[in-house]
Amino acid sequence: MAQVGPTTGDEYSPLLADIVEALGGVPTLPVIATRLLATIDDPSSSAGDVARLVAGDQALVANLLRMANSAYIGFGRQISSVTDAIVLVGLNGMRQMVLAISVIDVFRVPKVGEALDYTNLWRHSLNTAAAGRQLAPRAGLNLEAGFLCGLLHDLGKILLSRAKPDGYARAQMLACSEQRMIHQAELAVFGFDHGEIGAFAMDTWRFPSQLVRSARHHHCPAPGLPDGAGVAMVHVADAMMWDLTGVEAMGRPQISDEAARFLGVREAELSDLRAKSEAEAKSRWIALITG
């Protein structure tokens, strides 16, 4: 029986159950993150309520300030308090940062025996996030939503690698030996790809539908998809930045003409967009991934 996402109502392959069971359930986010997100989403909450809750977790304070300062290097002054950060990025921006930090904290370090190169994965994710931030206005999204969609689009690779390390190693070998894209090799091995399992996890965490669907469909954007603007944005960002960290032996993703037209991205712009995105990604690497 197909599983239904609690946030989107979208259906997922029944084959996902085997991966979720191998993981011992969908991984949980830190309690402080769950409480903080609930507070931010509560219409009766104030910026002060959020700041007081964050102040109770010094590790979260440090991560939020590091991320805020890396994101707003040109702001003209150092952001030294959570209150400053909230004033600068707003509650929605704070929400995006908490989501990013929470997921990275859970999945920063590989388990023993995994075949997945985490450093390479997070570098590509951050490159794609920076490109998403560049493309977000063209998709009608705010900058930090574009960043977060790009950052989490490949989360499913970690879930597959953790649940089925041998199976994921087979998918990687198949992709290299037959010049397939990794999601095509995953489909051959598992019956679904990293986009679907990553989307299912984020749906279970009740992440915004834009995040869920841009992860699920980023390899196969199609007209009429719900949240299609975010899907097109992540699709173009992912393919545009692939060369920087992609495994040469695997199949290379190609930018869909339709997605490019939807965003108004011309071939002549790609080099400049890629360079700007790479520069931003480098400025955020230490703050987000190694911090």
Image (tube, rainbow, N blue to C red):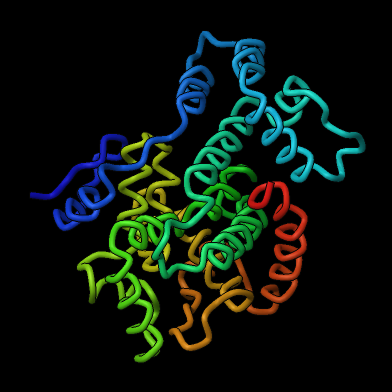
- Residue beneath the point at 35% across and 50% down: 199
Dividing the picture into quarters, in which one does residue 204 lie?
A: top left
Residue 66 in the figure: left or right of residue 204 = right
> Considering only vertical position in the picture, is 19 above or below 255?
above
- Identify which residue, 269 or 98, lies in the foreground: 98
Percent position (x, y) of residue 21? 20, 48
On the question of residue 224 being in view, the answer is no
Q: Position of residue 282 (x, y in %)?
A: 74, 60
Q: Which residue in the rendered view is the most extreme toward the left?
A: 1
The image shows residue 113, relative to residue 254, as above or below, that is above
* Extreme-front residue of the structure: 112
Q: Is residue 149 left or right of residue 81?
A: left
Closer-to-camera residue (190/4): 190
Does 176 sit above or below residue 132? below
Which x, y percent locates residue 163? 30, 57
Using the image, determine if residue 197 lies above or below residue 117: above
Residue ID at (79%, 39%): 69
User: Hey, which residue is sitting farthest top in the picture?
Assistant: 44
Q: Is residue 288 left or right of residue 17?
A: right
Q: Residue at x 51, y 60 (%)?
A: 234
Task: Say which of 207 and 257 sits in front.
Answer: 207
At a point 78% along the width and 23% down the height, the residue shown is 81
Q: Position of residue 67 (x, y in %)?
A: 71, 41
